[in-house]
Amino acid sequence: DLAAGGRLRSLLSWDLACFAGSLLLLGLLTAGTCRSPWHSLAWDPQFNANVFWCCVVYSILSMPWAVFIVPGLKTVLTHVNTTGYNVHGVCVPFALTAPTSSEEEDSGWTVHVNRVAKTAAKVFRLLERGRESRGSEAPGEYEVKDFFRGLFRRGPHRPAPSEPELGTSAEPRFV
């Protein structure tokens, strides 16, 4: 039946054209930039960079497929039911498995509390890195800009401590 899948047929044609175009682009880039013989292209860093950028181009051109990621929209657009295979290998309508007792204990509010705690810890680490970047010595005194300083700070998380001169440290030094 030619009418079945008619709307998706044009999207599949677009995907095929994008794939062929990215392969053509890879061929042109390789011919223009790689000087290695064909049998050793897999180890050529320029060829690997060409493959990477062709994958990026293909991914950008595949954006029309992103609509199907939206929950529920795939069913509306394709008019199909989600199926899966059971333990006997029979194709059945999709159903979630019943949680075991240990999963029931872990699920619920404890999962959400753990997720919030991990996120809060990450935010405070970013604030601390930003405070250190600003040069503040007082722990716990944060500014709004410290979050962004910590987010975009490059290099090690903590600056290397400077070596004190002999006789200036309060700690005893063994020479």
Image (spheres, helix red, strand yellow):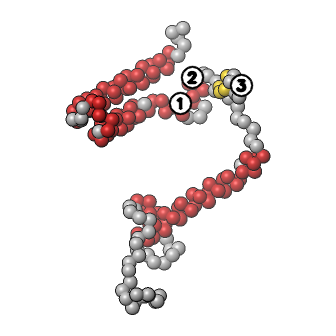
How many angstroms separate mark 2 from mark 3 (CA)? 27 Å
Mark 2 element type: helix
Please say if the residues under marks 2 and 1 sit with CB atoms less than 8 Å apart. Answer: yes
Mark 1 element type: helix
Q: Residues within 10 Å of mark 1 (few under 14, many from 20)?
A: some
Q: Which mark is residue 88?
A: 3
Type of amino acid at the residue the image marks with label 1:
Phe
Residue at 44% over, 60% down:
151
Type of amino acid at the residue the image marks with label 3:
His
Q: Is residue 98 above or below residue 124?
A: above
Q: Residues within 10 Å of mark 3 (few under 14, many from 20)?
A: few
Q: Which mark is residue 107?
A: none
Residue at 30% over, 26% down:
24
Q: Quadrant of residue 173?
A: bottom left
Q: Is residue 4 above or below residue 15?
A: above
Q: Which mark is residue 78?
A: 2
Residue at 67% over, 52% down:
111
| Mark sitting earlier along the chain (3/1) | 1
Q: Which mark is residue 68?
A: 1
In the rendered view, does 125 fall on the left or right side of 75?
left
Type of amino acid at the residue the image marks with label 2:
Thr
Q: Position of residue 85 (x, y in %)?
A: 66, 26
How many angstroms separate mark 2 from mark 1 (CA)? 9 Å
| Mark sitting earlier along the chain (2/1) | 1
Q: Position of residue 40 (x, y in %)?
A: 29, 34
